[in-house]
Amino acid sequence: MDPALFLQAAILSAISAVIYIIIGILPGTDETATMAPIALALLMAGLNPVLVLAWFMGSIVAFKIGDAVPVALAGIPGGVMAVPQVPDALVAKEHGLADVLLRKGNAAALISATIVTLFVLGVSIALMPVGAWLNTYDLVLG
């Protein structure tokens, strides 16, 4: 990978992480309504797909970490995917363990992000040989 591309990807993922941690803390915000349109706009603007992937991965990790804050501290789901965590968060809050729940949730999000990054890179490397075939024109639509 080109060092300039790597630097751009790191900068974009850091910017998206800051933006989406703030958005993720707000209860009621949804991933689909906030992340997908921006990722599509970046693709349509002609940005390198590797950079859009870095933007998207940074934003999804930050969003999931941000989702954990209102659940752990107040028992309010930050998004749809955080709803199953509410009963456990309320029990932890009753026992004074909201901070432990928040730390463990954020650590789990970071570990899962590392695992999924390695998985995505492995799948993309495995799909490289069929890239030319996948990139051909459609015979029906031209």
Image (spheres, rainbow, N blue to C red):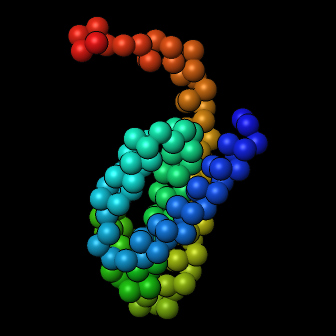
Residue at the far left in the pictured view? 140
The answer to whether residue 89 shows anywhere in this view is no
- Left or right, 67 with respect to 51, comes to left
Residue at the far right in the pictured view? 3
What is the quadrant of the C terminus in the image?
top left
Total number of numbered discs in the rendering: 0
- Left or right, 42 with respect to 30, comes to right
What is the quadrant of the N terminus in the image?
top right
Residue at the far front in the pictured view? 45
Splitting the image into 4 quarters, where does residue 126 fall?
Answer: top right
User: Is the residue 66 above or below the residue 116 in the image?
Assistant: below
User: Is the residue 92 above or below the residue 66 in the image?
Assistant: below
Picture coordinates of residue 33 (x, y %)?
Answer: 30, 59
Picture coordinates of residue 12 (x, y %)?
Answer: 58, 55
Q: Residue at x 41, y 13 (%)?
A: 136
The answer to whether residue 139 shows anywhere in this view is yes
From the viewer's side, name the closer residue of 140 and 69.
Answer: 140
Picture coordinates of residue 27 (x, y %)?
Answer: 33, 76
Picture coordinates of residue 123 (x, y %)?
Answer: 55, 30
User: Is the residue 113 above or below the residue 138 in the image?
Assistant: below
Splitting the image into 4 quarters, where does residue 74 fall?
Answer: bottom left
From the viewer's side, name the closer residue of 61 and 50.
Answer: 50
Q: Residue at x 51, y 18 (%)?
A: 131
Q: Residue at x 31, y 63 (%)?
A: 30
Q: Residue at x 44, y 85 (%)?
A: 73
